[in-house]
Image (cartoon, rainbow, N blue to C red):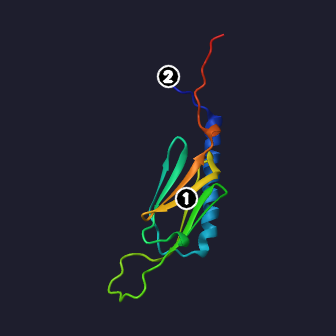
Amino acid sequence: MQSIWDPQRQRRELFAEVNRAFRAARQREELGSVQPNVHPPLDFVTTDAAYLVLVDLPGVTRENIDVLVERGALTIRGKKIAAAGNHLLRREREYGPFARLVPLPDDADLADVRATLKAGELVVRIGRRPGAQPRRVEVVEE
């Protein structure tokens, strides 16, 4: 079955995308006070029930991580501290403050957020509101 072009749906999707971009830009501007030296890699994954943000943070303790969810975005800030007492001959690993900003989709449930740190990986789970998921509507003949 061929789908029919729906300009109103396309307009709504475009406005939602533009709003997400502006929210992300505004929050990046707020993060400007942190000059990150560290840029930890992350993955943003979706399941039927939740979104998962997986961040590699080896050597970072729970006390040095701050997770904040507001205005449609997830902000992860922290600091990776170098071990003291060693005579440094070469440094290839990065140390210092970091901040990552992840704009969240509209169906993210900001009241259902959990963060866990295990074996150097931070996992942030953001629930999805069930009402926002698409559903199939049965067509009946009259």
Residue displayed at 42% across by 63% down: 119
- Which numbered disc, 2 or 1, marks the residue that appears first in the sequence? 2
Asked if marks 2 and 1 touch (Cβ < 8 Å), the reply is no
Task: Indicate left or right for 74 with 88 as reference.
Answer: right
The one of 131 and 105 positioned closer to us in this rendering: 131
Identify which amino acid the numbered label 2 is placed on: Met
Give the residue pinned by disc 2: 1
Q: Residues within 10 Å of mark 2 (few under 14, many from 20)?
A: few
The one of 29 and 138 positioned closer to us in this rendering: 138
Q: Residues within 10 Å of mark 1 (few under 14, many from 20)?
A: some
Residue displayed at 60% across by 24% down: 137
The quadrant of the rendering that contains the C terminus is top right
Give the residue pinned by disc 1: 115
The one of 127 and 39 positioned closer to us in this rendering: 127
Identify which amino acid the numbered label 1 is placed on: Ala
* Distance from the alpha carbon under mark 2 to that under mark 1: 42 Å
Give the structural element (helix, strand or loop) at label 2: loop
Task: Indicate left or right for 34 with 122 as reference.
Answer: right
Task: Indicate left or right for 59 with 136 as reference.
Answer: left
Residue displayed at 49% across by 62% down: 117
Labels 2, 1: front one: 1
Residue 82 picture location, percent across and down: 44, 80
Residue 24 picture location, percent across and down: 60, 59
Residue 118 picture location, percent across and down: 45, 62
Query: How many marks are shown on the rendered structure?
Result: 2
